[in-house]
Amino acid sequence: MKRNLTDKLISKTKPKADGRSTNLSDGGGLFIQIKPTGSYWRYNYRYSNKRKTLTIGSYPEVSIHQAREQHLEARALLARNIDPSEYKQHLKATQSEASQHSFEAIAREWFLRSKEGWSEGHAKRTKRQLEQDIFPWLGKLSFDQITGSEIIKIMQRVEDRDSGDMARRVKTPINQVFKYAKALGLASYNPVADIETKTVLRPRVKRRFAAITDPVKVGQLLRDIEGYQGGLVVRCALQLSALVMLRPGELRGAEWQEIDLDSATWTIPIKRMKAPTHIKQANQSVHIVPLSRQAVAILRELKPLTGRFSFVFPSARGASRCMSENAVRVALRTMGYDNETMTAHGFRGMASTLLNRMRGKDNQRLWDADLIEWQLAHKGSDEIRAAYNRSDSPEAMSQRREMLQAWADYLDALKTNKGKLQAFPTK
């Protein structure tokens, strides 16, 4: 690349007579901007089809030689599809004193390069994990200074704060950063490969979301919800949680445009469901929830209050976002249900358990297991996945609508009969 500037040329160049700056190009997008207030190095480049400018520093504090070095480093970042300006901002955000090849510097480069293929939530979790659990211990170290024991200590520190699942996941970004560093020739060995999680962490204790499945207690829960005094929006969310068999986040994020009250149908795009990131990004399928008469009545009661907003359950702090994930949990605690008794996710377990138990007079299942699994949006076995493919046929939709209406009627009976109804009604 031909370079054009010399100290002599810069020193004799002045700003324009009207006070506007004079720009001198050094080649490859690098130039110096000479203003009445001083001289400044800039680099013009294109990223994602947008014209951008990187500020390098002032002259002569940053010499021609130093400006050219930083220019070449920025061009190298672009070659790896990293925005130099965004990379510089990330380094400044934590006032990092790490060298260009420290673990933190390369991890931030990896993060910026990789996050385009991630969901927003995954990107936030990974960034928080790096900054809170990893950088304080590994950030300033070079890759040849990091040993397996250092990584194990990080995992065990996370585990000691009662975050067993997080402790198992914390080595994933470390592993990915080491792989990236190896590809760049900055690391010769990946110590994560020798760490066996089950050896260095305590055995995992599997816990299910607490759910009430005793019909008498379910009836009491429903009466408590009906008498909840904490606000209409939260009460409606609690009532719908029992009826629609959705995950808490899927319910909280409901938008009015997804709901057709006239046809009693709720159509949720796959981007809002639990699914691999690439499927969410493609967003080419939906999950359909047939709405019972009771569910429609709840939504009609709520619409005059929140119908002018996008979200069915807007946040109390502002309608531009949906209800907090803690809203239903706090409401349950207010009504006397602790985390060991009932959870927001537990409404799914409640429905699944009772629907699977239900038998007719001939002791035959009232509801097909695959039908229940599809309504829960579980991936399940190959057989269940095959059933999913037929789930939106008119016959299958009719069966699911019948099941959810029968479920809503059963819950009403439990609520109004105060537990006297037999546990397993007949069709």
Image: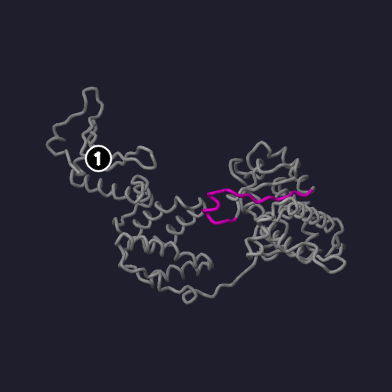
| x and y, in percent, of residue 259 in the image | 69, 43
Which of these two is toward me, 61 or 372? 372
Residue that sits furthest to the left in the current view: 8
Tell me where residue 189 appears, x and y as whole percent. Answer: 33, 69
Q: Mark 1 belongs to which amino acid? A: Leu
Image quarter for residue 315?
A: top right
User: Residue at 16% across / 31% down in the picture?
Assistant: 13
- Of residue 341 and residue 376, the one placed in the foreground of this image is 376
Quarter holding the C terminus is bottom right
**Image quarter of residue 212:** bottom right
Label 1, on which residue? 30
Instruction: Give the residues in magenta.
Output: 274-292
Q: In the picture, residue 351 is in which quadrant?
A: bottom right
Q: Is residue 107 magenta?
A: no
Task: Check the image and tell me how it is coloured.
Answer: one colour
Near-viewer residue (110 or 12):
110
Callout 1: 10 Å neighbours few (<14), some, many (20+)? many
Q: Where 410 falls versus 205 (above or below)?
A: above
Question: Residue at the spot x=46%, y=68% of the render?
Answer: 157
Decide: is 327 above or below 142. Answer: above
Please tell me whether residue 280 belongs to the stretch shown in magenta: yes
Q: Position of residue 357 (x, y in %)?
A: 78, 67
Name the secondary structure under disc 1: strand
- Residue at 53%, 49% (x, y): give it: 281
